[in-house]
Image: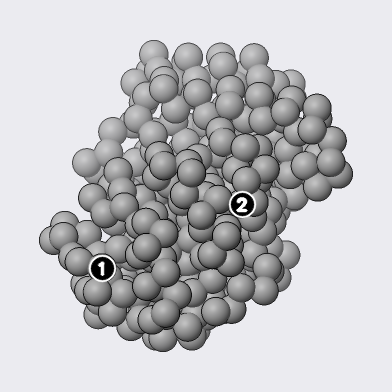
Amino acid sequence: MTNVGEFRGIYTALITPMTPDHELNEEAFRSVVEFNIRSGINGFWVAGGSGESVLLDDEENSRLAEIVTDQTNGRAKIIMHVGAPTTRRAAKMAENAAKAGVDAICCVPPFFYGQNDEAIARHYQSVASAASLPFFAYNLPSATGCEITPKMMSLFQERVPEIEGLKHSAFNFTYVREFVNMGLSCFIGFSGLTLPALSAGAVGTVDGAPGIAPEFWVELWNAFQDGDMERARAAQDKGIEVCNLIRIGGFHGVLKSAVSHRLGVDCGSPRPPGMPLSVEQDAILKRRLSELDLLPGE
């Protein structure tokens, strides 16, 4: 196990900006990366759930790895998601991500056809060895239909030498402490729970909401490191207000519109079948961003 603690802090789960034709918008993607770095985040989670992972072509996944590595230029850690239903596809994307220069890879369990623990362990073995980089499991049962338990992670620790930890985006919060006690680097996938997760020993948070207002979560992280719980709670409260913006409309639609409004850069709409926000929803979102002082010039 490689658990040396180099992955920690606030990791933005990046959106994938699109052109009006729903193609990858490289210029906008670079702007989003730069905005987050200048806001003080510690790293990126690329092409994950917030990045419309399963709606991307494998070639687009590999191109994102190249762009983010080039734009970041060592200023933040990069964890690249390479999850796919087949081992061959995931392993090939892992190999390409390693060639691009990312710091680690992550992977959901193979989805659509349910697999047992042994099959998932073998899948992870192949994917991790293809990159030969620190490896994070991605526990996202709401999308994959497979919840990674401490028992499963113990099996992965036995079978996958590259295993570093996981992103825990499941509702069983007590697992955080169990994963920590197993020596795993556990990121919480619900950024509204960053503070309690840190208190339980999590190494940080990975989520899309911090991409809207990274400064709130950077403040939370810094306050927690300083032992200033009052400051940390105040920052977490602001972060929860940002998380609540998702209720305005679809997840990807809110993320892309919010980031577009903040940066003054058109990040496009979700790739079909995803739907953009309605005019009314976008107006509500913009008003809420203004109330949170998150619009340019405010």
- Separation (CA) of disc 2 from disc 1: 24 Å
Residue 154, picture quadrant? bottom left
As drawn, 280 above or below 250: above
For badge 1, the amino acid type reads: Asp
As drawn, 80 above or below 199: below
Provide residue 245's location: percent of width, then percent of height: 49, 24
Which residue in the protein does label 2 denote? 202
Residue 252, picture quadrant? top left
Looking at the image, residue 270 sits to the left or right of residue 201; the answer is left
Q: Nearer the viewer, residue 43 or 268?
A: 43
Looking at the image, residue 14 sits to the left or right of residue 198; the answer is left
Which residue in the protein does label 1 denote? 117
For badge 2, the amino acid type reads: Ala
Ranked by sequence position, the earlier of labels 2 and 1 is 1
Q: Nearer the viewer, residue 194 or 77?
A: 194
Q: Which residue is drawn at 45% across and 75% down?
A: 157
Q: In which quarter of the image is the C terminus?
A: top right
Q: Is mark 1 on a helix, strand or loop?
A: helix
Provide residue 268's location: percent of width, then percent of height: 42, 41
* Crowd band around label 1 with a 10 angstrom C-alpha radius: few (<14), some (14–19), many (20+): some
Q: Which residue is drawn at 52% across and 29% down?
A: 243
* Crowd band around label 2 with a 10 angstrom C-alpha radius: few (<14), some (14–19), many (20+): many
Provide residue 289's location: percent of width, then percent of height: 59, 21
Q: Is mark 2 on a helix, strand or loop?
A: loop
